[in-house]
Amino acid sequence: MQKVIRTIVVLLILGLGVFVYVRYFWVFGTGTKAGTLNTFMKKGYLFKTYEGKIIQSGFRTNIQSIDFNFSVVNENVANILLNNAGKEVELHYKEYLAPLPWRGMEKYIVDSVYEVRNANTGRDVIMPRRYSQ
């Protein structure tokens, strides 16, 4: 009887460990997003994290737009975004299934910046391809 209980407990602990890993640490997807950097700030009650939003235009006539909310963990990436509000940015992100409080409030974590351009001229302002350090 003890062996059965011990086996059930071990299986429950392993199952819980797999669940936590997949839910919070496994990278579900990666990709890039581009748009105008609308807001970027450091906020939070207990864990201060960098949170931002870019607006992706659906059409050039701005009939439709889509917001992309994200968090940033890397301090260098955060400094780049803090200095470039209102500009066109191209970002690389990782998608997790759920956020962690110390990682940010969003499930999308931006880990690098591909490009930053002036919104009016389209001229490159900064960035070689993929700056993350």
Image (cartoon, rainbow, N blue to C red):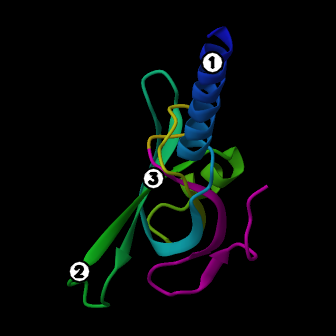
Left-right relation of 96 to 69: right
Task: Say which label, 3 or 1, has the lower sequence index.
Answer: 1
| Mark 1, secondary structure of its residue | helix
Of 87 and 132, the residue lying toward us: 132
Residue 48 x/y as whole percent: 52, 30
Regarding residue 5, the answer to whether it shows in the image is yes
Of 118 and 103, the residue lying toward us: 103
The range drawn in magenta is: 106-133
Report how far apart the C-alphas of labels 3 and 2 lie in the structure: 20 Å
Residue at 34% x, 80% y: name it. Answer: 57
Amino acid type assigned to the residue bearing label 3 in the image: Gly
**Position of the N terminus by quadrant:** top right
- Crowd band around label 3 with a 10 angstrom C-alpha radius: few (<14), some (14–19), many (20+): many
Q: Residue lying farthest right?
A: 133
Q: Quadrant of residue 91?
A: bottom right
Q: Determine which residue is flagged by label 2.
A: 64
Q: Determine which residue is flagged by label 1.
A: 4
| Mark 3, secondary structure of its residue | strand
Amino acid type assigned to the residue bearing label 2 in the image: Gln
Residue 77 x/y as whole percent: 66, 54
Report how far apart the C-alphas of labels 1 and 2 lie in the structure: 59 Å
Position of 117 relative to 1 (above/below) = below
Amino acid type assigned to the residue bearing label 1 in the image: Val
Of 84 and 58, the residue lying toward us: 58
- Residue 23's tag is none
Q: Determine which residue is flagged by label 3.
A: 52
Q: Residue lying farthest left?
A: 63
Position of 24 relative to 124 (above/below) = above
Regarding residue 90, the answer to whether it shows in the image is no
